[in-house]
Image (cartoon, rainbow, N blue to C red):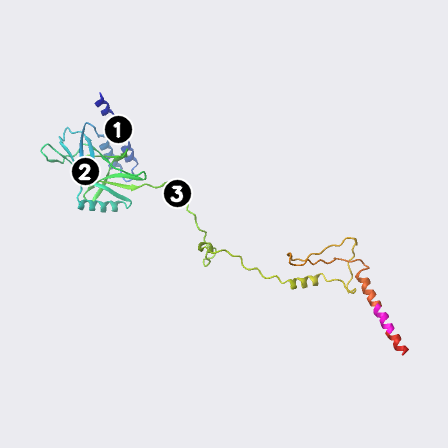
Amino acid sequence: AAAKAQAEKEKAKLEELKKVALANIATDKDVNKEEASKLKEIVNSASLKDTLVAKVVENGSTEEITVSFDNTSLQADKFVIEKADKETVAKVEELVKKAEENLTVVKTIDLHFIDSKGTTINKQGETRAVTVAVVANEDEKLEVYYVNGNKLEKVPSVYKDGKLTFFTNHFSIYTIVKSKTVSSDQNTPVPITPAPSNKNEEIKSDKGEALVQEELPALDLNKVLNETTQKDSLNILGQTDNKEIKDNDNLDVVKTNNQVTSATPVNTVKKGLANTGLASTATAGLGALVLLSALVLRRKFNK
């Protein structure tokens, strides 16, 4: 009962892998309709009727690679896996780089069956589902290619739970490759430095220089006072008529056009004076001159 339950579990697992493999074939843009049809046929005919296990020693540890197939007509006694020789490995790496630059070879292996007499079986036709334990990161994608002379032909494969399963109808040299998937952080916007308004103008902030405001022209206080005096000159000695001020009790303060600081005295003048102010003073001065002249003439006549 336990063996039967385990067999049912393995069968369900294989059917799930087949569904994923068929979906991958349907969405693969590099495979034309004719090739896709052949690959789907290979996947659909995969069977768990017979299973053979090959053991490979790599980096001091033993690795098991299994193959599931129908052994009725093949009569295979052993499943053998060998590492490809150095010349083949170099050739495959060159082919992989030519096919796509972002692909990296994980391993290249030579698969074959041997009968009870030790003879290699070259018969083809029956689907073989080969499962290999391979470690891959979350951002890596694994694929399998059949090395057909100087060409690489992709075969259906599925990576799940740390194991890579691929489907084929013959044995030969196969290579497992990996590639980096697109990272989500590549969509992060990159800050763009604004271009200068003038081609010959450099952005000082890029070099770490401080942006200093150009020096303002010095304030010529004497010039400002002269201009203000010319505009608002006082009406002295009756040279011009004073403007009539309706409210003699209120005096308006006239500010200069320039702002002053605490170090600069505030100049204020009365906008207007009463009619008895400056004009009266000028008249009194004129009278004094007349009297003085009369006194001088009188003394002259007395002599």
In the rendered structure, which amino acid carries the disc numbered 1? Answer: Lys
Q: CA distance from mark 2 to mark 3?
A: 43 Å
Q: Where in the figure is residue 39, as x and y percent of width and height?
A: 24, 35
Q: Quadrant of the N terminus?
A: top left
Sequence order check, earlier mark of 2 and 3: 2
Q: Quadrant of the C terminus?
A: bottom right
Look at the numbered disc 2 and give the secondary structure of its residue: strand
What residue lies at 22% left-to-right and 22% top-to-bottom?
Answer: 2
The residue segment tinted magenta is 288-295
In the rendered structure, which amino acid carries the disc numbered 2? Answer: Val
Q: Where in the figure is residue 127, as x and y percent of width and height?
A: 20, 32
In the rendered structure, which amino acid carries the disc numbered 3? Answer: Asn
Question: Taking 129 as reference, is 87 above or below it?
Answer: below
Determine whether, in the image, residue 162 is placed left or right of residue 192: left
For disc 1, the marked residue is 13
Q: Nearer the viewer, residue 32 or 15?
A: 15
For disc 3, the marked residue is 187
Instruction: Point out which mark residue 57 bears.
Output: 2
Sequence order check, earlier mark of 3 and 1: 1
Q: Residue furthest left?
A: 117
Evaluate whether residue 296 shows in this view. Answer: yes
Q: Where in the figure is residue 87, as x and y percent of width and height?
A: 17, 46
